[in-house]
């Protein structure tokens, strides 16, 4: 089924209930207005068919159409035409006619906006003229007490049905928005935050640390010899390794830690309210867990991690410098044998640390 057909069927389903409720109650409104004029039997039959058969027939027509959305919009025009017809047949009796036509106008504008309201208004006027030409009723007759009571259910219950429908649509839109927001910030392979989302959080955490003067650490994690794994076992196994590490991160980090995929085989973690020593302990446990774990399909495939950690310090000017310190610590872990956790010297600028290494 195409996306447009699915949306059209959903549109038809949403309108089925308010149409059934509105026309079912509208029968009593029209009947109370026409009863004093003693209309012929065919008019009563037409009222019953319109009030209790047409809603389900309209839904069936939309469902069986190749273009359900267009079919349902045609049904809305038929609703307006019929509503105008009954308003004209009752001589534009003020309360019943206004109740019926305003409810139809509400339905049209909710379903199709101003354009559908304009089309529906033309259909209502055409239906009213046709009915007046057929029945020649007295215009604007006095409203009786029975007619007033007959209009009350439509004036009370039908707006509630429309309100409930709008609420359900609003909830669905909210859920869809949340799902899209999650997709836009999530790495599709690992389920962790993607590069952009994690970098945004890093900036927020940097600003919090600067404002609150609290401990905070950031870590960069690299899978050792990942290119060799891809070249030897293939990219499917490589993707499996990335998923394995993401699962290990979720299982071994705390709920407050913020993990993401930085790119390729590199992962990143923010550890709020965590000193450098605490962060080292946490990531050392992660390193050992991954190093001791065997791949289910390839027992001979052993994984190891190189990890670089940098603690927040007052010497840092921005989040980029903080991340650079972690990157330099990762470089040191990889250049001194891999499969280890290395931390940047606390309180020392990354550039000074790098110069010390060169010396």
Image (cartoon, helix red, strand yellow):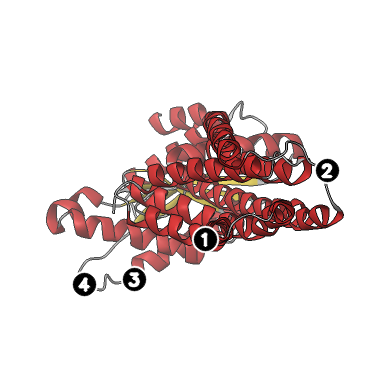
Q: Which mark is residue 112?
A: none
Reply above or below: 39 against 329: below
Toward the left, the furthest residue is: 232
Q: Quadrant of the C terminus?
A: top left
Residue contact between numbered discs 3 and 2, judged by CB atoms under 8 Å = no
Label 1 vs 3, first from the N-terminus: 1
**Disc 4 target residue:** 297
**Disc 2 target residue:** 142
For marks 3 and 2, give the CA distance: 86 Å
Q: Nearer the viewer, mark 4 or mark 1?
A: 1
Q: Nearer the viewer, mark 1 or mark 2?
A: 2
Residue shown at the point (38%, 40%) measured from the top left = 331
Residue contact between numbered discs 1 and 2, judged by CB atoms under 8 Å = no
Reply above or below: 137 against 290: above
**Foreground residue, 240 or 336?**
240
Q: Is residue 224 visible?
A: yes
Measured as percent of width and height from the top left, residue 348 is found at 58, 33
Q: Nearer the viewer, mark 3 or mark 4?
A: 4
**Foreground residue, 57 or 33?**
33
Asked which secondary structure carries label 3, the reply is loop
Q: Badge 4, how many Cα within 10 Å: few under 14, some, many 20+? A: few
**Disc 1 target residue:** 49
């Amino acid at each position: 089924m195409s996306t447009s057909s699915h949306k059209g069927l959903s549109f038809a389903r949403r309108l089925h209930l308010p149409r059934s409720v509105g026309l079912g109650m509208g029968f009593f409104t029209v009947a109370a207005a026409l009863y004093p004029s003693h209309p012929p039997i065919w008019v009563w039959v037409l009222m019953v068919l319109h009030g209790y058969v047409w809603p389900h027939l309209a839904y069936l027509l939309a469902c069986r159409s190749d273009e359900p959305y267009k079919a349902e919009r045609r049904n809305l025009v038929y609703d307006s035409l019929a509503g105008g017809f009954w308003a004209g047949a009752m001589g534009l009796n003020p309360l019943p006619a206004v109740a019926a036509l305003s409810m139809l106008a509400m339905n049209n504008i909710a379903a199709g906006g101003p354009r559908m309201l304009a089309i529906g208004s033309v259909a209502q006027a055409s239906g009213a003229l046709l009915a007046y030409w057929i029945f020649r009723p007295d215009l604007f007759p006095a409203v009786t007490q029975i007619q007033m009571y007959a209009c009350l259910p439509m004036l009370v219950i039908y707006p509630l049905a429309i309100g409930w429908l709008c609420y359900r649509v609003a909830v669905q839109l909210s859920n869809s928005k949340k799902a899209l927001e999650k997709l836009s910030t999530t790495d599709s392979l690992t389920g962790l935050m993607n590069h952009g989302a994690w970098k945004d959080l890093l900036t927020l955490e940097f600003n919090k640390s600067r404002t609150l003067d609290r401990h905070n650490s950031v870590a960069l994690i690299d899978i050792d010899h990942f290119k060799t794994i891809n070249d030897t076992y293939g990219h499917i196994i490589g993707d499996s390794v990335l998923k394995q590490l993401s699962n290990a991160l979720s299982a071994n980090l705390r709920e407050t830690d913020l993990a993401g995929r930085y790119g390729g085989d590199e992962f990143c973690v923010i550890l709020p309210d965590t000193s450098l020593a605490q962060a080292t302990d946490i990531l050392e446990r992660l390193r050992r867990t991954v190093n001791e774990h065997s791949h289910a399909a390839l027992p001979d495939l052993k994984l190891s991690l190189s990890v670089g950690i940098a603690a927040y310090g007052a010497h840092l000017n921005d989040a980029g410098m903080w991340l650079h310190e972690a990157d330099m610590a990762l470089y040191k872990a990889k250049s001194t044998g891999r499969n280890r956790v290395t931390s940047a010297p606390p309180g020392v600028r990354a550039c000074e640390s790098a110069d010390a290494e060169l010396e």
